Amino acid sequence: MKLQLLLLAFLVSSAVQAEDIRLQPPKDLNGYFPFNPPSSLSEWDARKEQVRRQILVSQGLWPMPTKTPLNAVVHGKIEGDGFTVEKVYFESAPGFFVTGSLWKPKVIKGKVPAVMFAHGHWQDARLSLGDPDKVRAEIAAGGERFERGGRSIFQSLCVQLARMGCVVWQWDMLSDSDSVQFSREIVHKFAKQRPEANTVENWGLYSPQAETHLQSIMGLQTWNAVRGLDFLLSMPEVDPERTAITGASGGGTQTMLLAAIDDRIKLSFPCVMVSTAMQGGCTCENASLLRIGTGNVEFAGLFAPKPQGMNTANDWTREMATKGFPELQKLYATHGKKDNVFLLRGEHFPHNYNAVTRSAFYTFLNKHFKLGFPSPVIEQDYEPLSKEQLTVWDDKHPAPKAADPEFERQLLKYLAEDSDKQLRDADPQVLRQGVEVVIGRTYDKAGEVEWTLKDKQDRDDHLEMTGTLSNQTYNEELNVSWLYPKQWNGRVIIWLDDAGKSGIANPQVKELVAGGAAVLGVDLLFQGGEPVKQTRVVANPREFAGYTHGYNHALFAQRAHDVLTLVTFLRNTKVGSHPSPKSVCLAGFGPQTGPIAVAARALAGEAVDRAAVDTHGFRFGQVLDYRDPMFLPGGAKYLDLPGMLSLQGPQPRWVRGEGKNPESSAVEWLMK
């Protein structure tokens, strides 16, 4: 009778049902990405660490690849009016060349500041010169000052900074100018999956295998930026306490990311990209996992309290003065450094890094690096250099093979093997933290969960109930069914089935209930109807997983979230007056639910006492379709499913499908 009364209290505890937010259309790069500043520095420190790790994981940089010798080649020095420029190429990874121009003051005394200049989607940016008629139009509109210098915004910035006493590294985006190993079609215009690159071994970019290993164009460019900073800081004349980065458009994206993940950067000036609106439209600006639950304004916030400037234009940044920048000011004020963040209003200009914006950057740099020039700093004219003068490759320095698919495959293979070796040798915590980002939710942040009873039937020796679990924190819902023995032994078994909660009709479940265990069946997300054959993607015609999974968790991860919701409900005594289980067990034997059980158990830790799973030998790295329900960005990166199995902890487990199978049956083992 006591059990009946406790159970009744559990059943009648109710919650207001909310529609599962995951049933709405998936978020895309044109969504709304507000930033909510923290109320305290301790709160921000925890959030900052979480977002920073998310960026690193998304870029394939957790752990960082092995830093091999740069083998830098610097040649072809040209002397100009107050500056010099040299041609440079180095290897960010063996055989992977980064190309660019190294600008220096003509006279260097002592330690000098260094600036990294990332460019965006200006084709052949470093080597090109603008049309004279367009330059005159820019001058008439107030965007440029000189007919000569205005022909290259890239040379203009580098020349001026060198004249101000700075060393400047201006490097090429992949496929641009002298960076020839990837084609522009692959880097910026990728549209359709390539069957020849979609293979379990020797895969290419954009394939499911590349995504499950977190290999992307964006990640390669972020790595090139890290190695570019290594290159700059290797110069004895560079002051490591005065290092800056700037760039506009796609270069603004690169600026934000490097500033967010690399503490060696001391000043940042991302242009026309910090926004609560569009987050970056190119394939080179998106990566799976990157912006789930976050966005560009928060990325900029990760740089606080160090000096940071940005601007607005008549583009997606036009509302930044009222949406995003006030929140950044509040964050900087929390650090006691409100004046360290600066916004140049320029909504009357189109998308740009024009002379007005460049002047703002020079002035900001001059102030914080104490360069001693009159403020504001005004750019001076110069004679721009030709493509022939700046190009890195020549007869003595031949270019590598252009747009080589075999190089692409070999580079990805090298990076995957390097990552595997590092993870096997690393502290297990590195692996765990990577998996936590890949799944996107941990047990301690699984949410507040409430129960609503829908139906209860007396089945003689047990009760059968159906109802809804509402995760109030994340606005998610689960339909569940209980088989509850009247002579309950205190054990609850979460029974995951590929068919959903109807799977508790399994004869094995009846045997468990007859033995005194309560069994909970559940419809994980999109279970309970026709099986999902292809997952949803955003309304973008380009077949790139990052456009969907850069903003939304994969279905596999969302179903793992559902399991954590169930475990949290069972373990959370604050939910209601339900009897507290003596033990919580997890069972998953289907081709889909077995691996989900492994992932959830890896993150639930001691909250799950025992687990029984059949993995069916599943591997994320063998999924050949990025719309497959089992596709998981990053799933193969962290030693695939065996990596998740290694995180199960000391709690007992029964595993089939991974070599030698257990001698006992799953039912016998679950009832021990």
Image (tube, helix red, strand yellow):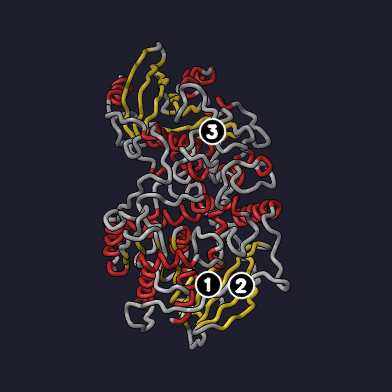
**Three-letter amino acid code of the residue under disc 1:** Trp
State how far apart marks 2 and 3 are (Cα).
Answer: 45 Å
Residue assigned mark 1: 169
* Secondary structure category for the residue under label 2: strand
* Secondary structure category for the residue under label 3: loop
Residue assigned mark 3: 629
Is residue 592 in view?
A: yes
**Three-letter amino acid code of the residue under disc 2:** Val
Look at the numbered discs 2 and 1 and tell me whether their residues touch, using CB distance below 8 Å: yes
- Frontmost residue, 444 versus 519: 444
**Three-letter amino acid code of the residue under disc 3:** Pro
The residue at 31%/66% (across/down) is: 342
Q: Using a 10 Å C-alpha cutoff, classify the residue at mark 1 as few (fewer than 14 neighbours), some (14 to 19) or many (20 or more).
A: many
Image quadrant containing the N terminus: top left
- Image x and y of residue 567, in percent: 42, 35
Please identify the quarter of the rendering in which residue 201 is found. top right
Q: Using a 10 Å C-alpha cutoff, classify the residue at mark 3 as few (fewer than 14 neighbours), some (14 to 19) or many (20 or more).
A: some
Residue assigned mark 2: 88
Q: Compared to 352, does 185 lie above or below?
A: above
State how far apart marks 2 and 1 are (Cα).
Answer: 9 Å
- Frontmost residue, 96 versus 629: 96
* Secondary structure category for the residue under label 1: strand
Marks 1 and 3, the one that precedes in the sequence: 1
